[in-house]
DNA sequence: GCAGGTTATCCCATATTAGGTTATCGTTAC
DNA sequence: GTAACGATAACCTAATATGGGATAACCTGC
């Protein structure tokens, strides 16, 4: 049990990333492939076992094909 | 020597955070105080010895009084 | 209930982080 | 030029997090 697994802001962020991935219809394996990382990487950041720094987040947003700014705005609104 | 200390995107991000802090006229000690962290925390993320995850970044932006979205946009533009 | 596809867990060596302490740097005053 | 300070960097090490291949657990449809 690593990080702020419980901090609601992290929970919101994770839920948002997982939801966006599903919304665009990609599997963890596909996202991982685009990121050149193992599937466990995606699983981990979606479940809070690993955190994403800002640059990593931009990479994830890019391979998901989502707007990184709009998505952070969603997060801000959620946790506001 | 930790992280992607050399990846230009991380370098840009660090430079941006340090520049914004100086622009708003705060010292590392002051920022650290607002974050309830030691001064070395601020020094570390500004020099790439430690990374900021997305939630931590939002905290930093908040205590700096800067717009988190606009700042990430600046980063995106810089590294585009 | 089996096959396939998808996601979660394991494992644990390696890497990063925390944070108090101390050193270094820069500037100003005397 | 040097003492005094404020500011930032560097140090140290126990505690924590990460990497990633392998495997287990979950679905869902048939």
Image (cartoon, coloured by chain):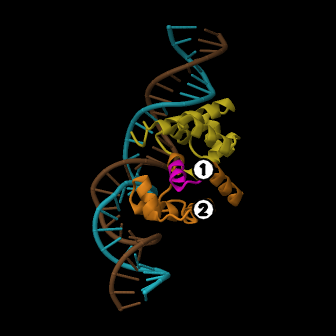
Chain colours: A orange, B yellow, C brown, D cyan
**Is residue D25 placed above or below A16 in the rendered structure?**
below
Q: Chain of mark 2?
A: A
Dot 1, how many residues are within 10 Å of its Cα: few (below 14), some (14-19), or many (20+)? many
Q: State the residue in front, B52 or B41.
A: B52
Compared with B28, D1 (above or below) is above
Q: Which residue is mark 2?
A: A16
The segment highlighted magenta reads A58-68
For mark 1, what is the residue?
A68
> Does A61 appear in magenta?
yes
What is the chief secondary structure element of the magenta stretch? Answer: helix
Q: Kindly identify the residue that appears in the image at 67 percent across and 52 percent down.
A: A73
Q: Quadrant of residue B70?
A: top right
Q: Mark 1 — on which chain does it sit?
A: A
Per the image, label 2 sits on a secondary structure element best described as helix
Is the residue marked by circle 2 packed among few (<14), some (14-19), or many (20+) residues within 10 Å? some
Q: Could you tell whether A80 is left or right of A31 in the image?
A: right
**Residue at image point 38% right, 59% down:** A38
Quarter-of-image position of residue A74:
bottom right
- Estimate the x, y position of residue D8 in percent, counting from the top left: 54, 30
Residue B36: tell me if it is visible: no
Q: Are marks 2 and 1 in contact (CB under 8 Å)?
A: no
In-image side of B51 versus A13 (left or right): left
**Can residue A69 be found in the magenta stretch?**
no
């Amino acid at each position: 049990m690593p990080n702020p697994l419980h901090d609601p802001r992290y929970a919101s962020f994770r839920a948002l990333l997982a939801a966006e991935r599903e919304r665009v219809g990609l599997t963890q394996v596909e996202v991982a492939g685009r990121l050149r990382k193992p599937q466990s990487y995606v699983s981990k950041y979606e479940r809070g076992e690993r955190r994403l720094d800002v640059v990593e987040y931009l990479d994830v947003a890019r391979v998901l094909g989502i707007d990184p700014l709009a998505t952070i705005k969603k997060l801000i609104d959620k946790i506001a």
